[in-house]
């Protein structure tokens, strides 16, 4: 692993300080954070993240949570197999209920009310729908509610299609979380993953180098940055694109 230069260390420290001063942040949890490869909910990991979110809110920072995992949890619950689109959408419908029940119960213990927002790309591309959505977010945050966002998979095929159309896929909510950050005036986007960082090809398991700071996203486009894992749908490539 290479060592960061003093200049990069200064910039990284400045970024952490800026994050600590942020008034509003978006936190994104990928499928591999929410659940284990076995399909079981990652209770311990989620519990630790929820406690961190509670602490951030106590410091006066507003938090918007973007979460994946509905399809995987639903698949485990009803024992559905295969990648046929209607099956994935059915799994998403079942899993979303399970996902929200976990979040609602966990945050209720800290006295924090939560709200579910299931979004599609059209909610941002349509001016009227976007303004309505923005007003809803503002009202929720003003009343101390934690908005919990996911793509509306049962009606939107963009994210869960086996071969998504170019420019239409949120990519395991990576692009969705970036949209929420920019459109809802958040000052930072924190993307949590089960990978310890961004690695050059061929990845961390095969000796790929850790990339400490990304200065030019386009320069990494042809670097073989990893795609989705077995359970996730995004991967590091969609995080960079976002």
Image (tube, rainbow, N blue to C red):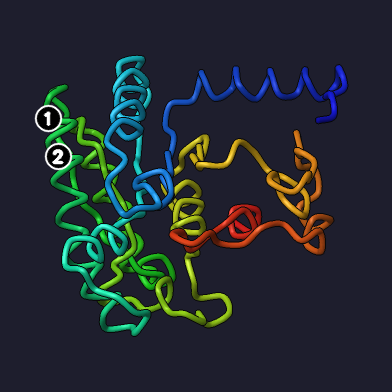
Above or below for 145 versus 90? above
Quadrant in the rendering for residue 70 = bottom left
- Nearest the eye: 61 or 101: 101
- Callout 1 secondary element: helix
- Nearest the eye: 39 or 213: 39
Numbered badge on residue 108:
1
Above or below for 138 versus 20? below
**Number of other residues with Cα within 10 Å of mark 2, as a class: few under 14, some 14 to 19, many 20 or more:** some
Which residue position is annotated with label 2? 104
Residue 156 image offset from top left, x and y in percent? 33, 76
Q: Residue at x 23, y 33 (%)?
A: 142
Residue 144 image offset from top left, x and y in percent? 21, 30
Q: Residue at x 25, y 66 (%)?
A: 75
> Can you say which quadrant of the picture contains the C terminus?
bottom right
Marks 2 and 1: CB-CB under 8 Å?
Answer: yes
Marker count (numbered)? 2
Q: Residue at x 33, y 18 (%)?
A: 55
Q: Is residue 61 left or right of residue 143?
A: right
- Callout 2 secondary element: helix
Quadrant in the rendering for residue 81 = bottom left
Numbered badge on residue 69:
none
- Nearest the eye: 209 or 116: 209
User: How far apart are labels 2 and 1 at the CA level?
Assistant: 6 Å
> Can you say which quadrant of the picture contains the N terminus?
top right
Residue 189 image offset from top left, x and y in percent? 51, 40
Above or below for 37 versus 103? below
Q: Is residue 197 left or right of residue 38?
A: right
Q: Residue at x 44, y 34 (%)?
A: 25
């Amino acid at each position: 692993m290479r060592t960061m230069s003093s200049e990069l260390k200064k910039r990284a420290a400045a970024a952490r300080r800026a994050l600590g001063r942020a008034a509003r942040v978006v936190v994104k949890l990928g499928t591999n954070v929410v659940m284990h490869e076995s399909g079981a909910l990652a209770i311990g990991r989620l519990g630790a993240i929820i406690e961190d979110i509670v602490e951030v809110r106590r410091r006066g920072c507003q938090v918007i949570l973007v979460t994946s995992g509905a399809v995987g949890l639903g698949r485990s619950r009803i024992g559905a197999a295969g990648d046929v689109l209607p099956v994935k959408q059915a799994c998403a419908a079942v899993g979303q209920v399970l996902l929200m029940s976990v979040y609602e119960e966990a945050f209720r213990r800290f006295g924090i009310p939560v709200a579910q927002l299931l979004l599609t790309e059209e909610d941002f591309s349509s001016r009227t729908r976007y303004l309505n959505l923005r007003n809803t977010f503002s009202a929720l945050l003003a009343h101390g509610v934690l908005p919990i966002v996911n793509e509306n998979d049962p009606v939107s095929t963009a994210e869960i299609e086996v071969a998504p159309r170019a420019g239409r896929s949120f990519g395991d909510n990576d692009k969705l979380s970036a949209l929420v950050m920019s459109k809802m005036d958040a000052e930072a986007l924190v993307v949590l993953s089960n990978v310890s960082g961004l690695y050059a090809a061929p990845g961390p398991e095969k000796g790929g180098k850790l990339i400490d700071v990304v200065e030019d996203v386009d320069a990494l486009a042809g670097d073989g940055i990893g795609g989705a894992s077995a359970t996730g749908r995004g991967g590091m490539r969609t995080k960079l694109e976002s």
